[in-house]
Amino acid sequence: MRVILYTKPECHLCHDVEAMLARLQDELQGQAAFQVIPRNILEDPQLFQAYRYLIPVVVVERPDGRQITFHMPIPQDALREALVQGAAGA
């Protein structure tokens, strides 16, 4: 499963969410494996327009094709649940 993290350099909230995702990767290893893919919104004008006031943004790309999007504040419990449900195909 893929998790896209929309971010930009020098964003302390983005670093906090990146750390949360790393903790969840460790916690959910056998239950809900996922790959975090950081996307710097400064490298793409369309991403910048879409997310400049919203970052960090986390998009969980589920194997069934559905996406779940989180904006700040991102509750860790809700993100964990989305990851587990996505891995289970729920």
Image (tube, rainbow, N blue to C red):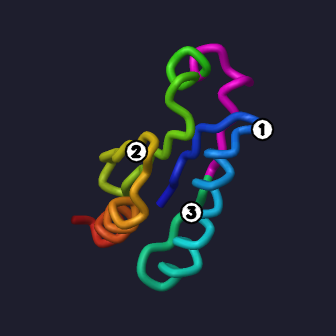
Q: Position of residue 4 (x, y in %)?
A: 54, 46
**Residue 78 versus residue 33 in the image, above or below:** above
Towards the viewer: 90 or 78: 78
Q: Which residues are magenta?
A: 37-47
Q: Which residue is mark 1?
A: 10
Residue 50 lies in the magenta stretch: no
Towards the viewer: 61 or 12: 12
Whichever of callouts 1 and 3 sits on the residue coming sooner in the sequence is 1
Q: Quadrant of residue 38?
A: top right
Q: CA distance from mark 1 to mark 2?
A: 20 Å
Q: Position of residue 57 (x, y in %)?
A: 50, 40
Q: Position of residue 16 (x, y in %)?
A: 63, 55
**Outermost residue to the right:** 10
Is label 1 in contact with label 3 (beta carbons under 8 Å)? Answer: no
Secondary structure found at label 3: helix
Quarter of the figure that contains the C terminus: bottom left
**Residue 1 versus residue 33 in the image, above or below:** above
Residue 39 lies in the magenta stretch: yes
Secondary structure found at label 2: strand
Q: Is residue 62 left or right of residue 9?
A: left
Q: Amino acid at mark 1?
A: Glu
Q: Which mark is residue 2?
A: none
Q: Which residue is mark 2?
A: 70
Q: Amino acid at mark 3?
A: Leu
**Outermost residue to the left:** 90
Q: CA distance from mark 2 to mark 3?
A: 12 Å
